Image (cartoon, rainbow, N blue to C red):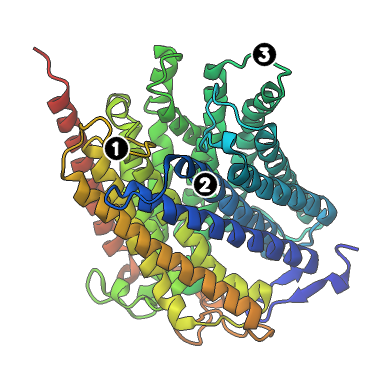
Amino acid sequence: MAGTKDDYRVCGVTTLKVDMHAERLIIANAVMAVVCLVLGGIAALLIALTRWQAVHLLDATWFYRLLTLHGIDMLVAWIVFFEMAGLAFGSTALLNARHAAPKLAWFGWGLMTIGGLLANGVVLFDPKSTVTFTAYVPLKAHPLFYLSYILFAVGALIQVITFFINLVVAKREKRFEGSLPLAVFGLMTAAILAVYTLLEGAVAIVPAFLWSLDVFPVYDPGIYRNFFWGFGHPAQQVNLAAMVAIWYMLAQMTVGIRPVNEKFSRLAFILYLFFINLGSAHHLLVDPGLSFAWKAVNTSYAMYLAVLGSMMHAFSIPAAMEIALRAKGHNKGLFGWLRNGPWNEPGFSGLVVSMILFGWIGGVTGVTIGTEQINMLAHNTLRLPGHFHATVVGGTTTAFMAFTYYVIPLIFRKELKLKKWAVWQPYVYGVGSALVSLGMITSGLQGVSRRNWDITFAGVVPGTVDLTLAIFGIGALIAVTGGIMYVTIVLVSILTGERKEATNMLLVAGNDNPLLESTKLTDHQMEDKQNQPKGTLVLVFAFLVWFAVYYLTNWWLLGRTWFIR
């Protein structure tokens, strides 16, 4: 029975209690996440070698079929399974609490697994289900396609509900006092966004399922698009909140941070709850069925309050890292702390790579595309996937991969193998992801369309796209290499690693335990003038300059396109 004394073990590194029911759920969700990553990664490689016009590997049918599969596995399945593992971990281990509803959570996991595998099967073996990830009505797929979406979403919703049950039970059993720990607070933000997202998805997909069965003779495409993007884009906001929570955990695990100001960080998460879903409107700004008032509201300055939330985290986390490293004596100059960071620790390098790709490429391009006038020009070009490959692939996936390396010894209780590979993997994957995004964005700037199998049919793109598409293709090859390294490390560790209790938090960089060191960081050290985050402040201003240059350049380019005579 869940919650009895024998159901726990105590982790020797974190000193946290781990509920065995939760541990098994975390492992099951993590395994399915990696399975989906492999399927989606194979599709990614073949798609990239087709969009790279000089190679153009697949025929049109298989291109669109794998494009559908890639979207489902990478944008949804891999990340949502990983988030479910994170929710189970956050609501039990981080609170020293039990899993209060393991049977219900297993039921949810089962539905997600059936739904995910069914979606892959339908897309691969039903030639009529090449409707891409968006499955815009009136394109009609096989009923099993929509059913697979529903099963997966219901399963995810059930697991999210068990997260809230765990929080209520933990509070009632006094497993924690006062506010939730910051990382769990961030995961709770992700869970609240997930509920909203999954319900919107149900409103879009359930009628589509009935329409595919001919229960409904027609289904209004405008209504479908509206509710689909209430699911499609907010799903990435769930990723954002979960990713930021993992950023805080990685920083504490590898550097030993204390948040500079917890209320400041919590306010940033709350801004996500109220304003971040406005960002999903950019998918519909070119839609003729929506009113000017709707578009004006959804591109209003309120959207920038969510951006403000991300920028608050983007200052808070590096600032906390700088203070912690300066407190250890690395306080020479503006960036001595950064040079002396544990760059060979995959959790640290993965965190830094994730933040750079997410903010400097994904964030800046996303805010720019969210401007209605620029969106009109950019939306149906490769600039859009260039943006979300920086956020989802470069940002979220890199952070999740880095976190996995600590899940293996702490939850799987297996020794991490191929540690030298783990040192290099975040860099290889990060460089590849950056080239993919930059290749897409620069191709889109030259007019390369977003989803077309063949861009040569109209003869309107300049010859220079061959160079930028080559950058994209080479980046994809490097990123896939990084992905293969990650999967190999995970499989070799799980299948051949010696089963033993972890004894050290740092995997490569030494024998310290930053997680426990963070609890010893005193108020005096936090406030010491020598330890203040001067370097982070310089980085923040550099980011703002880059953002202004990119944003204003886009307005200049827009002016070069729309001439007024």
Lateral position of residue 472 relative to residue 146, left or right = left
Of marks 1 and 2, which one's residue comes earlier in the chain? 2
Q: Up-down: is 219 above or below 106?
A: above
Task: Tell me the element at label 1.
Answer: loop
> Residue 423 versus residue 349: which sits nearer the camera?
423
- The x and y percentages for residue 163 are 72, 50
- The x and y percentages for residue 445 are 23, 38
- The x and y percentages for residue 252 are 50, 68
Q: Quadrant of the N terminus?
A: bottom right
User: Any mark on residue 75, and which?
Assistant: 2
Q: Nearer the viewer, mark 2 or mark 3?
A: 3
Distance of label 2 from label 3 (alpha carbons): 30 Å
Residue tagged by mark 3? Answer: 217
Residue tagged by mark 1? Answer: 455
Q: Up-down: is 80 above or below 522?
A: above
Lateral position of residue 525 relative to residue 77, left or right = left
Question: For residue 478, what is the image quadrant?
Answer: bottom left
Q: Up-down: is 17 above or below 196?
A: below
